[in-house]
């Protein structure tokens, strides 16, 4: 017995929507760098980006066990990530967020985070730079003016968050999800249309200063919005909730044969598995928005019985279930409950309720 996946995926929309807690899915672009082929980067939100050949993909020292990749700046030489996104009309609101790991590089070079600067001569008023300056502070330069954060940012061997919001000329910096200084740009109320695409890590072209990055530093979860993100939204991006599964089994009477193969990472496949027996005719995963413990036959149903329940079915050959988590950043931090069910025979009285896995959607 097999349930077709397209039915299950349609049903899954309701509990996923109910779980969404961080409404930041309207990004112009958002990169988690989990899908990189050669120098091509598939975005979680937005168009495909490209990177310089000397920018490696890192897979060690990630901030989440479910996040297997990030990008690293070169050890030397010019390198950047071209997002293939450009600001085509002026805007009174702009927000940017990124995770970085300086890998203890505290050298006095400039470190670009977001830029549309072509690197030639002085920065034109129509171009923008968001970087770490030689004094260690964050800086936003636009409209021919520059403002600095209140203090220097962390540059140890750990992961940190940096970002800014621009709203009608007021710049608010953020570090590790918390406000880090706000300043008004006098005479500047909008960010002008840009003459170049947005780039990460370094300027658009290698025509002026080189190596404007933490050498061997790491970057992840870079996103841009043409609106002003709220403080709680910045805090969520800083927390970067990790995709996770948590075992649960009510009073303990259900068999513990249901497990997660990997965490539910937004924009990627989430896989679970159910141990089968020689009598197993089918396996199912039931998804719901909330946990519960309800007596059912000889076992316990571990989900709240609501109209948003969804069922995934599979043949017992593999006992595995795979579902694609939508590429919606707003789902990050959302929670669902799931339970494994096995049919060990041909009649409904041979249904075996298994343990639950409470999941957190994340990176």
Image (cartoon, rainbow, N blue to C red):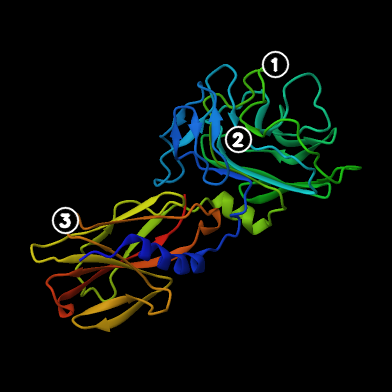
Which badge, 2 or 1, comes first in the chain's sequence? 2
277 or 299: which is nearer to us? 277
Q: Name the residue under label 1.
A: 207
Whether residue 24 is visible, yes or no, is yes
Q: Mark 3 points at which residue?
A: 317
Residue 217 % position (x, y): 54, 29
Extreme left residue here? Answer: 278
Label of residue 83 in the image = 2
Residue visible at 78% across and 42% down?
Answer: 89
Residue visible at 63% across and 52% down?
Answer: 234
Q: Is mark 3 on a helix, strand or loop?
A: loop
Residue visible at 57% across and 16% down?
Answer: 77
Q: Is residue 71 above or below residue 323?
A: above
Q: Is mark 1 on a helix, strand or loop?
A: loop
Residue visible at 45% across and 40% down?
Answer: 34
Which badge, 3 or 2, comes first in the chain's sequence? 2
Which badge, 3 or 1, comes first in the chain's sequence? 1
Q: Is mark 2 on a helix, strand or loop?
A: loop
Distance CA(mark 2)–CA(mark 1) = 19 Å
Q: Is residue 78 above or below residue 189?
A: above
105 or 29: which is nearer to us? 29
């Amino acid at each position: 017995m097999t349930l077709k996946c397209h039915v299950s995926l349609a049903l899954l929309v309701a509990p996923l929507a109910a779980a969404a807690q961080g409404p930041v899915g309207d990004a112009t672009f958002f990169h988690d760098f989990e899908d990189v082929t050669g120098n091509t980067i598939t975005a979680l939100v937005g168009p495909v980006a490209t990177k310089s050949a000397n920018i490696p993909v890192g897979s060690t020292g990630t901030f989440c066990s479910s996040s297997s990749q990030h990008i690293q700046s070169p050890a030397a030489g010019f390198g950047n990530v071209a997002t293939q996104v450009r600001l085509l009309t002026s805007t009174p609101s702009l927000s940017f967020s990124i995770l970085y790991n300086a890998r203890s590089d505290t050298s006095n070079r400039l470190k670009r985070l977001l830029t549309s600067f072509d690197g030639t001569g002085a920065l034109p008023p129509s171009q923008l730079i968001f970087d770490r300056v030689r004094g260690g502070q964050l800086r936003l330069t636009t409209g021919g003016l520059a403002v600095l954060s209140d203090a220097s940012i962390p540059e140890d061997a750990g992961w940190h968050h940096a970002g800014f919001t621009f709203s009608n000329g007021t710049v608010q910096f953020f570090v590790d999800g918390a406000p880090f200084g706000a300043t008004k740009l006098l005479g500047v109320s909008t960010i002008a249309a840009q003459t170049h695409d947005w780039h990460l890590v370094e300027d658009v072209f290698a025509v002026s200063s080189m190596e404007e990055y933490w050498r061997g530093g790491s970057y992840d979860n870079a996103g841009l919005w043409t609106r002003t993100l709220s403080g709680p939204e910045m805090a969520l991006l800083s927390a970067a909730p990790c995709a996770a599964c948590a075992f649960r089994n009510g009073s303990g009477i259900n068999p513990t044969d249901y497990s997660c193969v990997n965490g539910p990472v937004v924009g990627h496949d989430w896989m679970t598995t159910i141990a089968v027996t020689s009598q197993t005719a089918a396996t199912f995963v039931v998804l719901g928005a909330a946990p519960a413990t309800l007596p059912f036959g000889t076992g316990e149903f571990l989900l709240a019985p609501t109209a948003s329940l969804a069922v995934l079915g599979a043949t017992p050959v593999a006992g595995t279930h795979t579902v694609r988590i939508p590429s919606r950043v707003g789902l990050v931090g959302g929670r669902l409950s799931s339970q494994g069910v096995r049919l060990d025979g041909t009649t409904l009285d041979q249904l075996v309720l298994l343990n639950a896995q409470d999941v957190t959607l994340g990176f």
